[in-house]
Image (cartoon, helix red, strand yellow):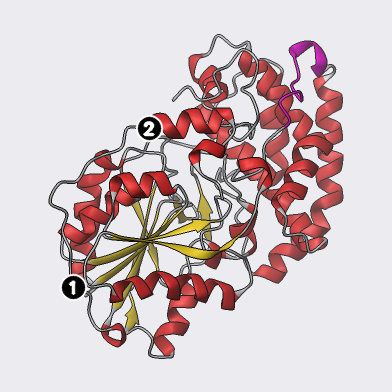
């Protein structure tokens, strides 16, 4: 299993020295019944629609992906992760087709109209303002369930 | 990612995440998390394998049934990568210096020839998949190599894209170049293997050599931003290497 202690020196040094935020009194929301859930994906893969402004290296902002958007590009700053999987199949990182199939089968209620991407390299504390904006958009869209997927 | 989960849960959403670094999940303690022992870049596990992807999603959504949290459970499968890595890493000894670069025009010509040879495979990949991820830079494919080669010659060409300065543009072009190669080969040869693709592109192709040459130039550069892309490991995949690039911390964030 890949644990921090087993990682090579550069990765171990970088990942172990990251300052991690603390969240006191964390919230806990009772989930909706599975068949009633309206699900949005939040990805930190810095993916956006072709032609949109690229993410900056430590971006705090976000991009919106429509549930039917497939012509997407990635402007993530990091190179330490594999990009060949998403080149072959978007669902490897943003599983819109899988969620749609689950909705069709009644495993979930519905798939949100909008999904959201952030730059995973940025400090999450710096993303709070954007997260609040995304939360407002998701409320507007009737979302009650969020599936967060890293890259 | 774990921090975002807290923000969204506090805004009234039920959240669940999948994640790669278990120690971070333990420390930040998002409400519900499924740990994946997978290579980074593949959070749903396997491309073109809907059944596997659904297994991951269902395992994550199963955590909504837990009455209280924080919940952290492990997905039972392991998708292994070599030696504690979570992605491909260049061999630490594979480093070029400026003296190794030689005739940049000749190197550029070899890259262009190589790209021409891959074009049918790339076009077939785009046709089969109905999409391409090449295009983050918004530059034409035939301009990728000349743009990068200009930096290897020590020039700093203007960015053709409004609002994107030259070095961030260079980085986008580098990623587009790599995507052009790997999209072509993963389709043509039905390869889905991180190590094979990494070794081929970075250690065997002329494009890889062009980018290692760029790294050599960046390492000696007075340009702070160009230098930063080496210190931050933003061009060449050395994050999982057994040692940093000589002359660089390799993690200068």
Badge 2: residue crowd in 10 Å (few <14, some 14–19, many ≥20) = few
- Specify whether disc 2 shares its chain with disc 1: yes
Label 1, residues with CA under 10 Å away: few <14, some 14-19, many ≥20: some
Q: Is residue B167 left or right of residue B189?
A: left
Q: Is B236 placed above or below B175 here? A: above
Q: Is residue B19 visible?
A: yes
Spot occupied by residue A22 in the image (x, y as percentages of width and height): 22, 41
| Residue A104 position within the rendered picture, expressed as x and y whole percent measured from the top left | 43, 89
Segment colored magenta: B91-101
- Relative placement, left or right, of A13 versus A118 is right
Q: Is residue A21 above or below residue A85?
A: above
Most extreme residue toward the left is A25
**Side of A60 relative to A27 (left or right):** right
| Residue located beneath label 1 in the image | A30
Mark 1 secondary-structure assignment: loop
Q: Residue at x 15, y 46 (%)?
A: A24
Residue nearest the viewer, comparing A63 with B146: A63
The first of marks 2 and 1 along the sequence is 2
Q: CA distance from mark 2 to mark 1?
A: 31 Å
Dot 2: chain letter:
A
* Residue A73 image label: none
Q: In the rendered structure, find residue A18 and report the number of the disc placed on it.
A: 2
Question: Percent from the top left, x then y, of residue A58?
Answer: 38, 35
Task: Name the image quarter holding residue A86.
Answer: bottom right
Q: Disc 1 sits on a residue from what chain?
A: A
The reply to whether the magenta stretch includes residue B28 is no
């Amino acid at each position: 299993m890949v644990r921090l202690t087993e990682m090579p020196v550069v990765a171990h040094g970088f990942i172990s020295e990251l300052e991690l935020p603390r969240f006191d009194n964390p919230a806990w929301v009772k989930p909706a019944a599975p068949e009633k859930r309206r699900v949005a994906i939040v990805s930190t893969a810095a993916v956006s629609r072709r032609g949109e402004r690229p993410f900056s290296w430590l971006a705090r902002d976000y991009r919106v992906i429509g549930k039917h958007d497939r012509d997407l590009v990635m402007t993530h700053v990091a190179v330490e992760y594999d990009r060949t999987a998403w080149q072959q199949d978007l669902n490897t990182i943003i599983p819109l087709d899988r969620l749609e199939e689950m909705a069709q089968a009644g495993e979930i209620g519905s798939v949100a109209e909008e999904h959201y991407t952030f730059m995973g390299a940025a400090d999450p504390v710096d993303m709070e303002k954007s997260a609040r904006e995304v939360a407002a958009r998701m409320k507007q869209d009737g979302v009650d369930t969020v599936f967060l997927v890293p890259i | 990612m774990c921090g975002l989960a807290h923000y969204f849960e506090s805004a009234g959403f039920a959240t669940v995440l999948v994640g790669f670094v278990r120690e971070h999940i333990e420390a930040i303690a998002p409400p519900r998390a499924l740990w994946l022992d997978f290579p980074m870049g593949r959070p749903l596990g396997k491309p073109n394998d809907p059944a596997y992807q659904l297994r991951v999603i269902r395992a994550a959504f199963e955590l909504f049934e837990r009455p209280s949290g924080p919940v952290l459970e492990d997905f039972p499968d392991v998708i292994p990568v070599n030696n504690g890595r979570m992605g491909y890493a260049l061999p630490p000894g594979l480093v070029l210096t400026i003296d190794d670069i030689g005739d940049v025009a000749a190197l550029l010509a070899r890259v262009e020839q190589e790209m021409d040879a891959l074009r049918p495979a790339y076009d077939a990949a785009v046709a089969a998949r109905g999409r391409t991820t090449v295009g983050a830079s918004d530059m034409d494919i035939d301009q990728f190599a000349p743009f990068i080669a200009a930096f290897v010659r020590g020039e700093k060409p203007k960015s053709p894209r409004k609002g994107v300065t030259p070095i961030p543009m260079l980085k986008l072009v580098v990623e587009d170049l790599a995507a052009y190669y790997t999209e072509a080969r993963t389709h043509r040869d039905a390869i889905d293997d991180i190590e094979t693709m990494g070794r081929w592109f970075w250690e065997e192709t002329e494009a890889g050599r062009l980018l290692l040459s760029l790294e050599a130039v960046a390492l000696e550069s007075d340009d702070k931003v160009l230098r930063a892309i080496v210190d931050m490991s933003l061009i060449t995949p050395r994050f999982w290497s057994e040692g940093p690039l000589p002359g660089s911390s390799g993690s200068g964030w």
